[in-house]
Image: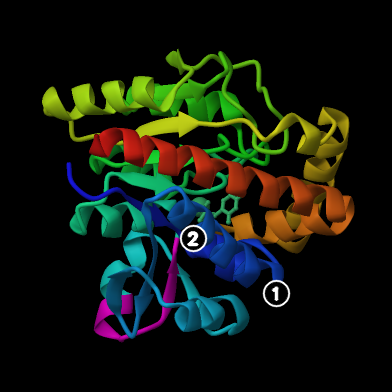
Amino acid sequence: MSHPQVALESTVIAHGLPYPQNVETALRLEAQIRAQGAEPRTCGFVQGRPIAGLTPDQITHFGRDKQVIKASLRDISIVAARQLDAATTVATTMWIAHRAGIDVFVTGGLGGVHRGQDYDESADLTALATLPVLVVCAGAKAILDLPRTRERLETLGVPVIGYGVDELPAFYTRSSGLPVDARCDSPAEVAAIWQAHKTMGLHTGMLLTVPVPPEHELPAAVAEEAIHTALAAAQAQGVRGKALTPFLLSAIAATTGEASLQANLALLQNNARVGASVALALSE
Ligand code: PSU
Ligand code: MN
């Protein structure tokens, strides 16, 4: 491999974090990756075109303007035909990264199987099952049904690596009680497994899960309480489908305030650092 590149998503900017912290964060993640000697490529759809490498002005537009929709896999054709501006989820960022020849993609939290009675499973899992991209994240958020999400990853053949940990992180907290498939303690170890994944001709994605830095971890009870409140509000208001994840994220931010925002920002920055180091290891 030649030139180290790191893809980034834009749904976290447009629908996952408040303005102006979202735009500041997106630009800070890019700066972190550049400082390590890799090239950041924030992804999105601009007037229906898939872009790997939004400009700072485009990132600001995504963070500020409410008409930028959230696009997952089922939205790609509609967004393209209607020439819409759309933020990319983990699923659609993987799709753009793969088309652009980028192996490493950094994000905060993965979508998965939702809790509750109605069956709702993120297309992030479909993308992981079908697109060979290494996704660096802090695990799946505990708003999800983590044991079911973990089982689905296994069924779909997606290797789950823990970075310096033996358990799958749960986004706001460092552990979930669920095992990873392998632990790696250096970028070179991760790079070796990813290279083997490609050499073996596998077409699935791979997850590199990195726990939130300890000083920014939320107490598990605080996270769980906020999640329960958010899920109850979603139920009461009948929120479902693509609106559910953004609704839950903002409800949690509203109850836990600064602490969850700081945890979210800290883990994104840390994931960017780890992702860039893996991209560099792959280019050696
Ligand atoms: N988790 C977060 N922040 C986010 C998301 C997930 O902590 O912004 C976004 C990601 O873009 C993810 C998407 O791909 O939510 C999943 O949405 P859905 O469940 O509708 O597939
Ligand atoms: Mn869904």
Residue at horizontal 62 percent and vertical 62 percent from the top: 25
SS at badge 1: loop
Write down the residue under mark 1: 20
Q: How far apart, in angstroms, are the residues tagged by discs 2 and 1?
A: 16 Å
Q: Quadrant of the C terminus?
A: top left
**Magenta extent:** 79-88
Q: Quadrant of the N terminus?
A: top left
Query: 10 Å neighbourhood of mark 1: few (<14), some, or many (≥20)?
Result: few
What is the x, y in percent for residue 45? 35, 74
What is the x, y in percent for residue 178? 58, 17
SS at badge 2: helix
Residue 30, numbered circle: 2
Image vertical order of residue 154 relative to residue 231, above or below:
above
What is the x, y in percent for residue 40? 40, 59
Image vertical order of residue 258 relative to residue 45, above or below:
above
Based on the picture, tell me whether residue 152 belongs to the magenta stretch: no
The front one of 248 and 217 is 217
* Residue kind at label 2, given as amino acid type: Glu
